[in-house]
Amino acid sequence: RFTTTALALGFCVSVFAQDAPDAAIIQKLRKEGLENSKVMDIAFNLTDVNGPRLSNSPGLKRAQEWAVKQLTDWGLKNAHLESWGTFGKGWQIDKYYAATTLPYYHALIASPKAWTPGTNGPIKSSVVLIKADSVSDLAKYKGKLAGKIVMMDAGAPLQSGLKPDFNRYADSTLTQMADAKPMAAGARGGQRPGANNMMAQMMKMREVRAAMSAMLVEEKVGLILTYARGGQGTFFTSNGASYALDAKPVSPELEVAAEDYLHILRLLRAGKPVELEADIKTSFYDQDPQGYNVIAEIPGTDKKLKEELVMIGGHFDSWHAGTGATDNAAGSAVMMEAVRILKSIDFKPKRTIRIA
């Protein structure tokens, strides 16, 4: 809490840093920020109360409306939602369940990929392992996948976490970093060895994946299982389709935590049958495809400078599988706390301060 509040206070001080520092105002800022911080309450409302904030989803709209009301209650002016242009469809998970039932029951740690459809009710199927290094390899699966749950023969082995998540730099290291000189143009020494081969392999994989995606839609597969980045109980989710209003149809897709995905993969590679059941329901929202920013201001008081803006902000949306605490409720909460502190001490800026 101290670190987060300190960040907010750092901004507050910078608002009037061009003028001679006012010790009394700085003391008020410190006192309010350190003794009456609301930053954790703000973060609580953005995450636990309003939940995931995927772009144009009901969760994002709910959080945006809360923020507008909160900023207004603090006394900021002109708090509103302002369209920045067309985004596309909103989407949310209404229901999700998936578990292996053979060789034994095991609930999966997973999440539907954003902007993918549901399963249209409960499904149950043996899991089919697809091995394809080229587009021609896909031909052997045609006509055999309708209603099936499929997964690709791919997945990076998990590495043990032998290093701490964070390290404090020694003073000597910080000095070395501060003294680092920019690299001269062209000093990298040209292309890395094997770069052309790596690029060719990537293009080939992209071609195979595009062909596979189209084939799976045509085959009407029941569900695709994909390998999620991450490990040790954490996984990173993503989107499985475009949010554009005219996006092409895709198959239902479930992003599975590495531990569970590799568990199923090991069984299938060993020739052991795996059965899985799933029930996924998702909703799309295309009534209002506009994207919106949360806007509010502390008006400037100087006749000559009040039309100038001091802008602060952070992205307000998040992915859908969690509540977006670090991406980016933390940043948004700090920015909201900064303007709350300024209003609470009745600070009168020369320039208008706008949060967005």
Image (cartoon, rainbow, N blue to C red):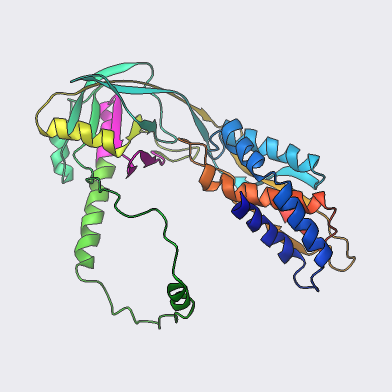
Query: In the picture shown, does residue 239 fall above or below 102?
Result: below
Image position of 314 (left or right of 247): right
Query: In the picture shown, does residue 253 fall above or below 36?
Result: above
Query: In the picture shown, does residue 255 fall above or below 310?
Result: above
**Nearest to the observer: residue 221 or residue 109:** 109
Give percent across and percent down for residue 193.
20, 71
Q: Which residue is drawn at the image coordinates 50% and 37% (left, top)?
A: 245
Figure quadrant of residue 316: top right
Q: Which residue is drawn at the image coordinates 25% and 41% (left, top)?
A: 211
Res 221 visible: yes
Image position of 131 (left or right of 180): left
Give percent across and percent down for residue 73.
80, 39
Magenta stretch: give its range. 212-240
Q: Is residue 313 magenta?
A: no
Image position of 51 (left or right of 347): left
Q: Which residue is drawn at the image coordinates 34% and 32% (left, top)?
A: 253
Q: Is residue 215 magenta?
A: yes
**Nearest to the observer: residue 323 or residue 245:** 323
Q: Which residue is drawn at the image coordinates 80% and 57% (left, top)?
A: 28
Figure quadrant of residue 151: top left
Figure quadrant of residue 223: top left
Give percent across and percent down for residue 346.
85, 53
- How many numbered callouts? 0
Which residue lies most toward the left here?
A: 271
